[in-house]
Image (spheres, helix red, strand yellow):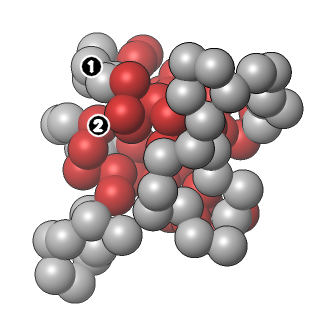
């Protein structure tokens, strides 16, 4: 499953909250990294455990939340 597009929106209704997704956001917030709504939506909408694991690793070192989505090899969003 791809996590590249945003899901939901203000009228999307209730969502299942994934603790693994929330963890990424909490790490960023705890580190003082601002999390824009677009990043929040993308992380919460992702169900791919491999991608979520990669984002968790990055959450400990990025300086901007959008950097979670950069590829290790080319610096482009994944």
Total residue callouts: 2
Image spot of residue 3 (x, y percent): 54, 61
In the displayed structure, does residue 16 sit left or right of residue 11?
right
Task: Tell me which corner region of the image, top left, top right, bottom left or bottom right, holds residue 31.
Answer: top left
Q: SS at mark 1?
A: loop
Query: Is label 2 in contact with label 1 (beta carbons under 8 Å)?
Result: yes
Q: Is residue 12 visible?
A: yes
Disc number placed over residue 49 in the picture, else none: none
Residue position for label 2: 65
Q: For the point 76% across and 21% down, which residue is it? A: 13
* Residue at image point 71% right, 63% down: 49
Instruction: Using the rendered image of the protein, determine whether residue 24 is visible from the camera's viewpoint.
Output: no
Which percent across, then down, holds residue 14? Answer: 80, 21
Q: Residues within 10 Å of mark 1 (few under 14, many from 20)?
A: some
Q: Residues within 10 Å of mark 2 (few under 14, many from 20)?
A: many
- Tell which circle, 2 or 1, labels the residue nearer the N-terminal end: 1
Q: Nearer the viewer, residue 71 or 10?
A: 10
The percent position of residue 37, horizontal first and vertical second, equals 38, 24
Residue position for label 1 = 34
Q: Position of residue 75 (x, y in %)?
A: 15, 71
| The one of 49 and 17 positioned closer to us in this rendering | 17
Quadrant where the image shows the N terminus: bottom right
70 over 42 or under it: above or below: below
Secondary structure beneath label 2: helix
């Amino acid at each position: 499953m791809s996590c590249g597009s945003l899901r939901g929106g203000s009228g999307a209704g209730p969502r299942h909250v994934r603790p693994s997704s929330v963890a990424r956001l909490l790490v960023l917030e705890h580190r003082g990294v601002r999390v824009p709504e677009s990043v929040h939506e993308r992380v919460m909408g992702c169900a791919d455990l491999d991608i979520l694991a990669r984002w968790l690793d990055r959450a400990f070192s990025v300086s901007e939340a959008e950097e979670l989505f950069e590829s290790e090899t080319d610096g482009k969003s994944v």
